[in-house]
Image (tube, rainbow, N blue to C red):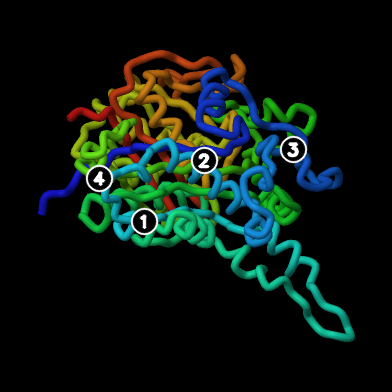
Amino acid sequence: MELKRVVVTGLGAITPLGNDVASTWEAAVAGKSGAAPITHFDASKFKTQFACEVKGFNGADHIDRKKLRQLDLYAQYALVAARQAVSDSNILEAPNLDRNRIGVIVAAGIGGLHTFEEEAGYYAMNEANGPKYNPFFIPKMIADIASGHVSMEYEFHGPNYGVVSACASSNNAIIDAFNLIRLGKADAFVTGGAEAAIYPAGVGGFNSMHALSTRNDSPETASRPFSKSRDGFVIGEGSAVLILEELEHAKARGAKIYCEIAGGGMSADAYHLTATHPEGLGAKLSMKAALEDAGMTVDEIDYINVHGTSTPVGDKSEVKAIVDLFGPAAYKLNISSTKSMTGHLLGATGALEALFSIKAVEENIVPPTINHEEGDEDEDIDYSLNFTFNKAQKREVRAALSNAFGFGGHNATVIVKKYVD
């Protein structure tokens, strides 16, 4: 069976750097940080008092009041980002559009955490009448519901579900959509991820694991992947959504094509509940599987958007995996972690970093890793690699590889490349 080719024809984003793709990309190229003191709740007694929040977003500006009551913030982000992507693709204008062959896969690592806190967290009980919960509690909370709302918005009747694999979730969603299209099961997918976990349980939970940076005196410099002084990740929120489309379907309607999805790879560390394998075993297997799936060699990759969370163990193990797999080719490509600017969007992070990789391929610009200080180097990281520190770099980007790794040892890698007819 000959596999069909899959291209990207639409993009949407609600992020800590901007509430659309253009402003998000502009800020990333400029090396701006999205970190600031937390406003979603009073964090004054928490070890970490800052995050990469979405700014200036009001769901009521985009969603009618009745529907808004049904949506947790994470689903609001997803729905608005999906609207942007669908509009950008112009897919609704396609003649004879078959909505039965358009699917939706929107991932979340946690889902409606704020809704859970409001309801179960405070235990809605009174002695006289027993428990009393909001009827929207469960459908607002569950991690698949954003996908359901997007499907209902457009009456897309193709495959529809969510993916949960912690911080690899939205890369897994993209890979699923890619595979279903190339197998001929659908013409197009709305796919990506969304997350909104900057609430007491999210921040407090990660603090208890010692996973978050506590650089409260300088939030904008706290996310510093590959620097020796890194002390944990900065939690972020938002959504990124892509329109994946079968090539001939896109060409038939004259769609703009951003790039081609070349391949996807997945693996498991099978090592630890939260820590990555110290030698980068799972990361290497995931990248290797993606390259094999794409039929590409290491020499064809020009940019890696690394998972790079700014944790002491995770950063160095990923670099080890790159050096081990790519060999001499590792020193010819560019490497950067955009989490230094956006923070870590958990289940949405893979989709946002895939979007950055797509823009890098489209515009031949590698976004930077900010907050790297001279002399702050980790002796276990090979700094002879071409890290794009503090300033974006222009170069030809024929293909980009984007990594996403999650608690539980989940690893997922997506490769995008320039579209050539």
Element class at badge 3: strand
Find the distance from the CA under tag 3 to the CA under tag 4: 41 Å
Element class at badge 1: strand
> Which comes sooner in the sequence, label 3 or label 4?
3
The residue under label 1 is: 103
Point 54% across, 40% down: residue:
313
Point 29% across, 31% down: residue:
417
How far across and down, in percent of the image, does residue 314 sit?
Answer: 52, 40
Mark 2 vs mark 1: in front = 1
The reply to whether the C-beta atoms of the residues labelled 3 and 1 are less than 8 Å apart is no
The reply to whether the C-beta atoms of the residues labelled 3 and 4 are less than 8 Å apart is no
Find the distance from the CA under tag 1 to the CA under tag 4: 12 Å
Judging depth in this view, the residue of 128 and 92 nearest the camera is 92
> Which comes sooner in the sequence, label 2 or label 1?
1
Find the distance from the CA under tag 3 to the CA under tag 1: 36 Å
Point 39% across, 57% down: residue:
156
Mark 3 vs mark 4: in front = 4
Judging depth in this view, the residue of 120 and 374 nearest the camera is 120
Q: Report which quarter residue 230 is drawn in.
A: top right
The reply to whether the C-beta atoms of the residues labelled 4 and 2 are less than 8 Å apart is no
The residue under label 4 is: 246
Furthest residue to the left? 1
Residue type at mark 1 is Gly
Q: Report which quarter residue 137 is drawn in.
A: bottom right
The residue under label 3 is: 50
Other-residue count near label 1 (Cα within 10 Å), few / some / many at <14 / 14–19 / ≥20:
many
How far across and down, in percent of the image, does residue 369 sit?
Answer: 53, 24
Left or right for 35, reference 186: right
The residue under label 2 is: 314
